[in-house]
Image: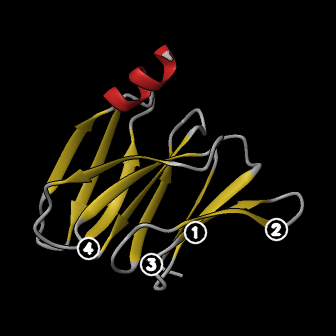
Amino acid sequence: MWDLAFSADGQRLVSGSQDRTAILWDLQTLEPVCLFADHGRAVYSVAFSPDGRTVASGSYDRTVKLWDTQNHQLVQTLKGHRSAVWGLEFGDDGKMLMSTSADGAVRFWSASWLWERAAR
C-alpha cells in the first residue's frame, strides 16, 4: 500500500496500492466494502471528500479518478498531469480538489462533479 485516508466520520478507510487499486474499508468490520479498479498503474494517493461521498485516487498513470462511495462507481477521470500523481487533498467545503505530481506540478480541480450528482 502507498497511501491511506480516513473518512471524516471515522467509519471508513481508503487505501491505495501498487496493484492499481483503491480499496474502501469498513472500520467496524475491518472488511473491504468495495474495490475501485480502473487505474493503469499503481495508486499512490487517495483522499475522501469532506462529506464522505467521494473518494479521489491518484496514480502513476497520471490520472485522478473520482469514485462514488455509495454506489461504488467511477464518477470521473481527471487528466492533465504529466507525471505520477503523488498527493490529493479536498478543500474543507469539498468544492475543490488539489493534486500534486512527481514533476512538481500542482493542479486545482473544481468539484462540479459533486454539484451535478447532487442535482440528480
**Pair 1/2: label in front:** 2
Q: Position of residue 7 (x, y in %)?
A: 64, 47
Q: In the rendering, which numbered label is found on residue 61?
A: 4
Residue type pointed to by label 2 = Glu
- The mark nearer the N terminus, 1 or 3, is 1
Which quarter of the rendered picture does the N terminus lie within? Answer: bottom right
Question: Which class describes the residues within 10 Å of circle 1: few (<14), some (14-19), or many (20+)?
Answer: many
Q: In the rendering, which numbered label is found on residue 31?
A: 2
Q: State the residue lying farthest toward the right.
A: 29
The residue labelled by disc 3 is: 20
- Left or right: residue 3 compared with residue 63: right
- The mark nearer the N terminus, 3 or 4, is 3
**For residue 63, what is the image quadrant?**
bottom left
Q: CA distance from mark 1 to mark 4?
A: 17 Å
Residue type pointed to by label 4 = Asp
Which residue is painted at 28% across and 76% down in the image?
60
For numbered disc 2, what is the local secondary structure? strand
Q: How many numbered markers are drawn?
A: 4
Circles 1 and 2, Cβ within 8 Å, touching? The answer is no
Q: CA distance from mark 4 to mark 2?
A: 27 Å
